[in-house]
Image: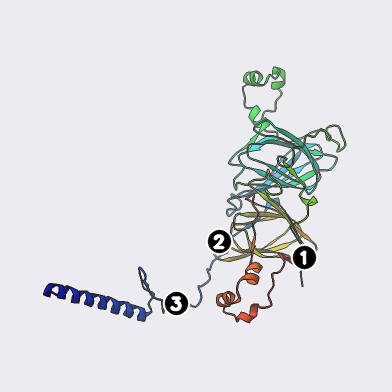
Amino acid sequence: MTDTNRRVFLGGLAVAAGGLAATQSLAAGNDGHAAGYDVAPASDYVPLIPRRTGDPVTFTASLDKSPIKSTSGGWARDITTKGLPIATGIAGAHLFLSAGGIREMHWHNSAEWAYVLSGHCQVTVVDPEGETEVANYAPGDLWYFPKGHAHSIQTLGPEPCHAILAFDDGLYGEHGTFGLSDWMSRFDAGMLTQALGLPKDYVAKIPAAEVYIRQGDVIGRDSAEARTVRVLDGKRTHRFPLMAQKPRVSSPGGAIHVASAKEYPIATTITGVVTRLKAGAIHSPHWHPNANEWHYVAKGRTRVTLFAPDKRMAVAELSPGDCAYIPRGCGHSVQNISAEESEMVGVLDSGTYAESSLSDWIAKAPHHVLANNLGLPAETFTTVTNRSVIVAAS
């Protein structure tokens, strides 16, 4: 070996030794350093990550105390992200139609979903290809209109009809709702006569602004008009009798009825969920990995606990007329705190229903994983079983 090669070789050994010594020194220091594959744990750590402080997020509001839009045949109230800022993905509404009332033909830039709380109505839908459905609805039925589908809702029978609505857009009204009278009243009369073939004297009688919900004659549930129906097949119909179906979840504590696109094919962007809890029962901690949730309390009083996006806990008590919005992925639970059965009418803004539960994790994860997660003896979990989604009061 030449002197030059010997010097290079010895120099390389020195560098390698120095690097190894430095690595060992750093590792021994336990200071959490990192350099490529060369890492070491940190000796300066906190035993627990401190909880975030400050006011918890506001995730509830009163739908039935929101501003009212009332005309001759009924009224509607809505709650959008303007009234509940966290609710960016879903807006809700409450629609009331008097006997003989009709919500005029209109359409939206968002999909509309509804659950009929009481009363009967006839819904007419015309899709962009001109296919028309006329169907009669009863309590417990759903409707769903894809965006841009023109529709009208008319009460049947002597009782009022009212429904809870949801839209897959937190600002649905401001983002585009288009009404028949509002549009036609702005046309030049001659143009409207030419375009539609309507007599000029009738064009002159078109209301000068939006009718919205108009009071008309009461249509009997057994009348010829009520029997004039054209219901599409199961894959295309806008009507779904949710409460006539077997619940997805049933236990001594209550039941959950679900209508996703699997059961209700036209509802591609919204899954409907009606949850009924016995007194004291709890819909145990869970989360929806693929959708935001919005629900309305129709009966009873509930306590909703939210593990919020900012990693703070928020707790709210809801009464009939109130609504809650749970952002996608946020852990939450709902407990009935009243002496009667509670009922929540809600939606997820996805046509696919998915729910992950804390009880699944506790029941199915290896005991050593749970022991390390929570710092408890592994034996703690040997008797834990997968509990029901709805747990009855003790």
Q: Which residue is mark 2?
A: 309
**Residue 73, quarter of picture:** top right
**Which quarter of the picture shows residue 295?**
bottom right
Name the N-terminal-most of marks 3 and 1. 3
Please state which amino acid type lies under the numbered disc 1. Answer: Gly
| Residue 1 seen in the current view | yes
Say which residue label 1 marks: 253
Residue 334 place in picture, x, y as percent: 69, 63
User: How was this image coloured?
Assistant: rainbow
Q: Earlier in the sequence, mark 1 or mark 2?
A: 1
Mark 2 vs mark 3: in front: 3
Residue 372 position within the rendered picture, expressed as x and y whole percent measured from the top left: 55, 77
Name the quadrant containing residue 218.
top right
Q: Relative to residue 177, is residue 343 drawn left or right?
A: right
For the residue carrying disc 3, how many other residues have a C-alpha within 10 Å: few (<14), some (14-19), or many (20+)?
few
Mark 1 surroundings within 10 Å by alpha-carbon count, few (fewer than 14), some (14 through 19), many (20 or more) = many
Q: Secondary structure at mark 3?
A: loop
Q: CA distance from mark 2 to mark 3?
A: 25 Å
Give 207 or 262, whichever is nearer the viewer. Answer: 262
Q: Secondary structure at mark 1?
A: loop
The quadrant of the rendering that contains the N terminus is bottom left
Does the residue at mark 2 contact the one at mark 3 (Cβ under 8 Å)? no
Q: CA distance from mark 3 to mark 1?
A: 44 Å
Q: Nearer the viewer, residue 12 or 270?
A: 12
Of all residues, the one furthest to the right in this rendering is 222
Identify residue for label 3: 45
